[in-house]
Image: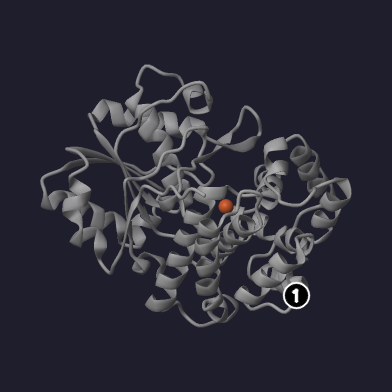
Amino acid sequence: MMFFMPAKVIYEPDCVVSHSKDLSALGSHALIVTGHNSSQRNGSLDDVITALEMHGVKYTIFNETEENPSVETVMKARDIGLSCGADFVIGVGGGSALDASKAVAVMMKNPESSWELMYDSTASPQHLPLAAVPTTCGTGSEATGVSVLTRHDLKTKMSMVHKVFPSLALCDGKYLLTAPKQLLANTAVDALSHMIESYIHASASYLSRMCADNGMKLWKSCKDFLAGDMPLDINTANDLLTASTLGGMAIAQTGTSIPHGLSYTLTYEGGIPHGAAVGAFQRGYLRNADRSDREHVLSVTGFADTDELGQFIADISPVNASQELLEKAADNLICNPKKLASCPYNVNADVIRDIIGGVICSG
Ligand SMILES: [Fe+2]
């Protein structure tokens, strides 16, 4: 067994400002990589700026990170970071901003390299120091080395081959309080998917399952909020965020599996949000799993059977994917031997058909 998660993760109300010294110690000029406006709305950007100004650290803001950030966006942020002389990177936002910030940290440290460096498995590039401030509850990117980027040249999403962990993650559930309910639901389904796929994974170990298991228990405690109409309270926000980080810690050990492999086609070609796309395949993934694993996951998450789990996910995070798109996703998965090998049970054509057949479409 091995457990590698080298990020210092701090969970605390107002931790960005109260741990400003840790954040500012990473360098003298920060490139803040964030999205278009959510980090302004939820207060996280203001907190980061306050923390840096307390210690006289300069900063430049790159706020052009789109959903499912592209390699081109990473290179644009790299150029801005180099021209302003930034010597560390802070990702502020959801998974898109955090994933982009990891690739930016690599490319800034290697200013002579072209974008291909991100996908050059023969290289072992260094990266600038990196901090993460998550503001959604899905990717757990603050606790993983993974950076998933859009490759327009290949018409899909693809992880950078180099693992880059933030050295510092500052987690405060208050940033979730202003997020739209649908975004919270989609990202919470992504977090649940990470925990299920990590628990039922060829590389699962006692330690990775410890993270997935405890994350699923926390996730269960948030189901009433996810399915209901009540506003988000700070305790539920913190639980959702912690579950998401635990999911990140779990997949940092194992990686994801078949549902994530199938989802990329739905997101790239169908425009379906990542959380909804991965959630749609959980029912089928779970019903094909080993009986004791399946029953454990259902028990910990509080579902009677895989149909109830699938319907819950479909209700809170709906998808509408054509049969043609689902079959295309299956065809693309078959060309991905690494993803197929990540599944602990044999994935043949019949099993893939059954997993796809488990998708509950809305409308
Ligand atoms: Fe995911």
Quarter residue 284 falls in: bottom right
The image position of residue 74, as x and y in percent, is 44, 33
Q: Residue at x 50, y 69 (%)?
A: 214
Q: Is residue 209 left or right of residue 312?
A: left
Q: Residue at x 67, y 55 (%)?
A: 277
Q: Is residue 197 left or right of residue 79?
A: right
- Against 65, is 303 above or below? below
Q: Residues within 10 Å of mark 1 (few under 14, many from 20)?
A: some
Q: Is residue 120 left or right of residue 154?
A: left
Q: Which residue is mark 1?
A: 305
Residue located farthest toward the right when viewing the structure as drawn: 350
Q: Residue at x 76, y 44 (%)?
A: 329
Asked whether mark 1 lies closer than 8 Å to ligand 1, one says no
The image position of residue 306, as x and y in percent, is 75, 70
Helix, strand or loop under label 1: loop
The image position of residue 82, as x and y in percent, is 29, 27
- Against 322, is 152 above or below? above
Q: Residue at x 25, y 66 (%)?
A: 14
The image position of residue 27, as x and y in percent, is 20, 38
Q: Is residue 194 left or right of residue 163?
A: right
Q: Nearer the viewer, residue 13 or 256?
A: 256
